[in-house]
Amino acid sequence: MFLTRPGVMRAALLATALMAAGCATRPGDDDPEGQAEFRETNDPAEPTNRAMFAAHEAIDRNVLQPVAEAYRDIIPQGIRIAIRNILGNLRAPVILANDLMQGETTRARITLGRFMVNSTIGVLGIADVARELGVPGHTEDFGQTLAVWGVGEGPFLFVPLLGPSNPRDLVGQGVDLTINPLSYFGQGLLVDTAGWTQLGLTVVDTREALLEPIDQLRATSLDPYSTLRSAYRQRRGYEIRNEEERGRVVGPSGVTGFGQGVTGPAGPDAREPTQ
């Protein structure tokens, strides 16, 4: 599971605290251009969000990035690809449920077919056989489902460790956890260990896939926070419209969270292409 239930509640409470802790000053009526920009960025809690971004950057530079770099250096690429494939296969039931809730029957058939092929011929998802047969996967989550149902995103939020988000997507993460059948697999040391292992691998796999994009963001952007905010919202728009390929989504396993919204590196500039 990507988040524990208490973790989802803490994220929601933190999001509320972000909104209450500090707000950007809305331009006056004598500044229509400023008001338009204020509405466009949709970031009324920007001062607090920037503080949360700074905290996230400190954690990332000192913990997440070094771990991801060590993971890449120590674990052979073939094994990393297998881990990523397994994580993607484990997420298939959530993607399928959201396909169905959005009325996307064709995409639901693709998701179900991929899950069956990869779980059997692909040996529990170790190999993405379906992709090799010309059937790539896609990502869906309940945040996207709410958007399809007409629910607005709400104000932009930055939550340390989770990354850029909004109230709709935070609620979506909680619902995805609830509808994930793996959440009800059982109890006990073995089940808990499996859940925490999946969480840890998800964190490391996602951050490893984002090594080049985040390095590039830090090196080229005068304001990484604004760039990340814009990239996140643009990518979510692509996902909601089922145009994932335009967003060049990093992390084919379809997870969200660490560094969410950063698009993938282009071609030869990447030190190692993501699969």
Image (cartoon, rainbow, N blue to C red):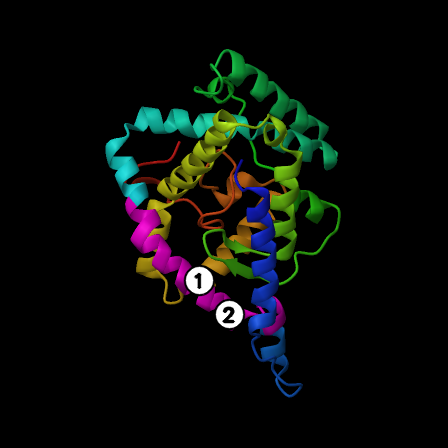
10 Å crowding of disc 1: few (<14), some (14-19), many (20+): many
Q: Residue at x 54, y 42 (%)?
A: 3
Q: Which SS class for mark 2? A: helix
Determine whether, in the image, residue 101 is placed left or right of residue 34: right
**In the figure, residue 202 lies in which quadrant?**
top left
Return the residue at label 2: 48
- Expressed as whole percent of the image width and height from the top left, the position of residue 204 reads 38, 39
Q: Mostly what secondary structure, the magenta segment? A: helix
Q: Residue furthest bottom?
A: 30
Q: Residue at x 55, y 48 (%)?
A: 7
Q: Residue at x 40, y 27 (%)?
A: 83
Question: Quadrant where the N terminus lies?
Answer: top right
Using the image as rendered, state which of residue 84 and residue 150 is in the foreground: 84
Q: Which mark is residue 53?
A: 1
Q: CA distance from mark 2 to mark 1?
A: 9 Å
10 Å crowding of disc 2: few (<14), some (14-19), many (20+): many
The stretch of residues the image draws in magenta is 38-66
Q: Amino acid at mark 1?
A: Phe
Q: Residue at x 61, y 70 (%)?
A: 20
Q: Which SS class for mark 1? A: helix
- Expressed as whole percent of the image width and height from the top left, the position of residue 165 reads 56, 55
